Amino acid sequence: MIVRYLYLAAFLFSIFAATGQEISDTKFGNGLINFIAKDSSFSVKFAPRIQARYIINWNHDGENYGSGEQNFLIRRARLKFDGFAYSPKLKYKIELGLSNRDISGANQFNRNTPRYILDAVIMWNFYENFELWAGQTKLPGNVERVVSSANLQLINRSLLNSRFNIDRDVGIQLRHHAYIGGNFMIREKIAISQGEGRNVTEGNEGGLQYTGRLEFLPFGEFASKGDYSQGDLKREPSPKLMFAVNYDYNQDAVKTRSNLGSYMFRDDGSLYSTDITTLFLDAVFKYRGFAFMGEFASRDADAPIALEADGITPTGAIVTTGSAFNGQASYLFHSNVEITGRYTTIDYDMVTGRGDEDQFTLGISKYVVGHKLKIQADISYTTENGNADNIMFRTGFDLHF
């Protein structure tokens, strides 16, 4: 199946070239191939990327750390297409994932097929500063999740994100921005989605998911959309700040982590459902090579313990509820070497039966061509309920055309 997609992509590119389309903007990092129609009626940019990783973990057994468990892997291998159709006001994005981690998760609700599609969305600037999005893409959730995995300053996102983010879904979004005086910008983002994550094909098992995000940028926009790219690679000459509040309500959710996690099945084959709410507060600050990102997350559920149809017997599934804080700070030296420190703490609700986690991470990155070509490494120390639990070392490279 993957080979067919690659053949199709190559075939389309050959058609574009043979029909006299213009190729422009071919500098490394701006896409492998760019096509713009001679009549400016459409454009296509193709930008593949890969992330290779080496990871070794030492788990603590209560007395000492055992021998390390190591793994080499291709964490991400993706094909990205974007551009406009008919008018520059009608943009689109398609992103396909080819790595095992990207396509895993086959089940009866996606017809037991690999989940190749990450993004398939159109974005219509229908009036002034209003945009309507339709399709599958990231919900307007916590800033760390919405930052592309191509633009991270550590090997991967934090524990806060892995436990409480709301990820991608299918639906519609309305986005708007406005200035309220000088450079002070406000951005509003509202989404209505299916509530079960990406690539679901078999109906809507629960209710709908409603997401709202309000962003404030008191000192104006960041250079090159730097509020959604980690590290101050543009060395902002004046202070830049974004702070935001985010609320998500998943009505009759049927998964243990809102639109993520496992389906909460009952013995009779039906699904348990409960209302799940998630709150995010986050901020990003950058100035002259220094960058800071802070996030707070809190998740609650009306009835987090899944019950059988009799309303008494637990199924064993429990919604992941609790709160978390993540803070990371970095400085980019003029050699384009960056040092980053991160602290994450997770406070689970007692009903989950999970021990609270704290993680300390120290990382180093060498940016050869910004985030497009970089080498990274980090080391993390994790505790559970205050006790030593794990040491993890990771390193790898990113190559993004």
Image: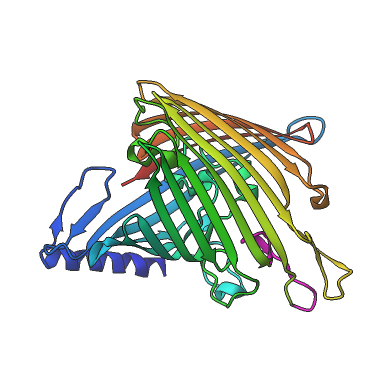
> Is 260 contained in the magenta span?
yes
In the picture, measured across the screen, residue 20 lies left or right of residue 81, that is left
Q: Is residue 332 above or below residue 144?
A: above
Q: Nearer the viewer, residue 295 or 197?
A: 295
Instruction: Report the label total.
Output: 0
Q: Nearer the viewer, residue 260 or 285?
A: 285
Residue 91 visible, this angle: no
Q: Position of residue 252 (x, y in %)?
A: 69, 68
Query: Based on the displayed image, in which of its 4 quarters is residue 382 positioned?
Result: top right
The coloring applied to the image is rainbow
On screen, 70 above or below 278?
A: above
Q: Position of residue 172 (x, y in %)?
A: 47, 66
Give the image location of residue 223, x and y in percent: 34, 36
Q: Is 112 above or below relative to 145?
A: below
Query: In this rendering, does residue 168 appear at all?
Result: yes
Please say if 215 is above or below 197: above
The residue sitting at 69% across, 51% down in the picture is 299
